[in-house]
Amino acid sequence: MSGSIEVRGLSRTFHTTVRRPGFLGGVRSLVNPERVAKEAVCDISFDVAPGELLALLGPNGAGKSTTIKMLTGILTPTAGEARVAGVVPYEERERNARNIGAVFGQRTQLWWDLPVRESFSILRDIYEVPKAEHAARLKEFDELLALSSFWDTRVRHLSLGQRVRSDMAAALLHDPPVVFLDEPTIGMDVVVKEQVREFLRHQVEERGRTVLLTTHDMTEVERLAERVVLINHGRLVLDGTLDEIRRKFGSTWQVRATLADPHTPVEPLPGITLLRREGPQVVFGPDGPTAPTVHQALKQVIERYEVTDIALDEAELEDVMRAAYVQSEVRVEDRAGGA
Amino acid sequence: MSLNALRIIWRVTRLNFRAQLEYRSEFLMMIAIGAIWQVSVIVFATVLLSRFTGMGGWDSSDVLLIPATRMLAHALFVLFLGRMHGVGRHIQEGRIDTYLVRPMPVHRQVQLEFFPTNAIGDMTVAVGLMVGALSRSQLDWTAGRITYLIACLIGGMLLEAAMFTVVASASLRFPAADYWSRWLEELLGTFGSYPLNVLPRAVGGFLTFGLPLAFVAYFPAAVLTGHGDSTGVPYWLAAASPLLGALAYLGARLLWRWSLGHYTGVNG
């Protein structure tokens, strides 16, 4: 089964009541409520290829969770269309549920009062997984997530890390081609985070699962995702690879080189500008929208000049994303001003 | 419902029950709470039998059939379909979201969330009351009457489930609506034991056509004890109580399904 995700013009509007300020305002709102429409997601389109891990990023309230809820069949969009592994999730909820696994970092899908292993076996029955297949998959997950050390413990007694690892296994026990992860590692310590990342990498690279991940952890994005979709105020701001995003928003890299001959004349290179020079020490930075990535710049500097030492300062992905968020805010404000 | 679905229901119920058993004191306390909750019905029955010879033109032994039917239908509701009370909390905690990504009806998952230990207390009191009511009854309990009583108990269970399912459906859109389930439970417990003809006409009318409490136990008991012609509604309507319970439940489940389709969730 193809594990692709196709999203076309997906929108979701919520209607809420605005409370007027003050006591009298409150009474007025009660008698004559003012209804406003809030576009949580607006005309979003993107694709995720089978076996691809896509990070869906954006600041709080950007519309990431609403998008995931529509793709998992929890919410029905107000416009647009989505297909997950060939199924329209909000039209065929139960059929879609058989094709997907979902982990919501802040809530569990396990039975609170039962030992983890009992929850796993109930899920085996619900998804009608053959016993031998279930046992083999559980063994594989145990090797990757060290589940057996706590799987006889009731869910209510698990630590957060143990609980999320159990949820991760529970979401994949029926071998779904598509997996949705909504902030799966939130609040976890670095050791468990790394274990979960390793597990996810294994699921994508070895098992070919399609993964849609939302997270605020940029280390996670860097380690796992090749492609990123950035949304803000419910609108798609950017869809590209990490390199493209760095090129577009990560304009803070610097290449520092020590020239073998301190008298060598230095000129700008394509897309690279000379920021400063102190004797043999020269510092290059990106120049304009056609600037190369930091690695390409490094290559160009080495090829053009004879250097005895070279170092680079690359903007952290977190800084890049912050720049992307800020620029997208400006764009939204411009649009609102224009309107 | 498929055989596999029944197997899963049985398995989860068994596991949930076993899980409750492991917390011994909590388990016993919940049973006691279930029984104590019905104290008002026990007091009513005791006062009725010791102080009055009848009520609203009914003999005490006939009146006793009303709280007994109502209690047993309620105990069955708590045991089989009673988890609809917690839907508002499930929504706030996002549990409905996790139910929606499993290939199983959400309603069934709500019912299988935990084992209702308090139902054992409810059931103990209800069975005791029904045994007491039947032993004092002057009626000839033919197979037809017993069958009708069983149908009424199932109908009463379904009618109560229908009322709580309607509130739960409203909770899917307005989580605060869950508070109405407390009011509903209070009202059913307060007025469920009386022949409604002793209440003011407007109240009786409301408890018949507004909140259909009369169809849970009053009308069935009236039909069984020969008071079916003096209930204020046509005899056929009172006699059709079990059928109305089933229809109301069917309608409530359709409303639940529709409401799930319009579920908006919380926290984006």
Image (spheres, coloured by chain):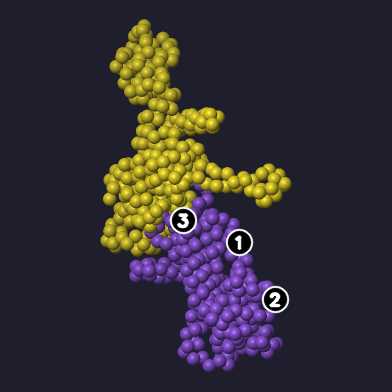
Give me the chain that's yellow.
Answer: A
Q: Amino acid at mark 1?
A: Tyr
Indicate the quadrant containing the N terminus of chain B: top left, top right, bottom left or bottom right: bottom left
Q: Chain of mark 2?
A: B
Q: Secondary structure at mark 2?
A: loop
Circle nearer the N terminus (3, 2): 2
Q: Chain of mark 1?
A: B
Count of marks placed on residues: 3
Residue at the (39%, 51%) spot, across then down: A89
Circle nearer the N terminus (3, 1): 1
Q: Amino acid at mark 3?
A: Gly
On residue B179, the disc is 1
Check disc 3 and report the residue beneath it. B261
Q: Amino acid at mark 2?
A: Pro
In the rendered image, residues at marks 3 and 2 fall on the same chain = yes
Check disc 2 and report the residue beneath it. B200
Residue at the (56%, 71%) spot, across then down: B29
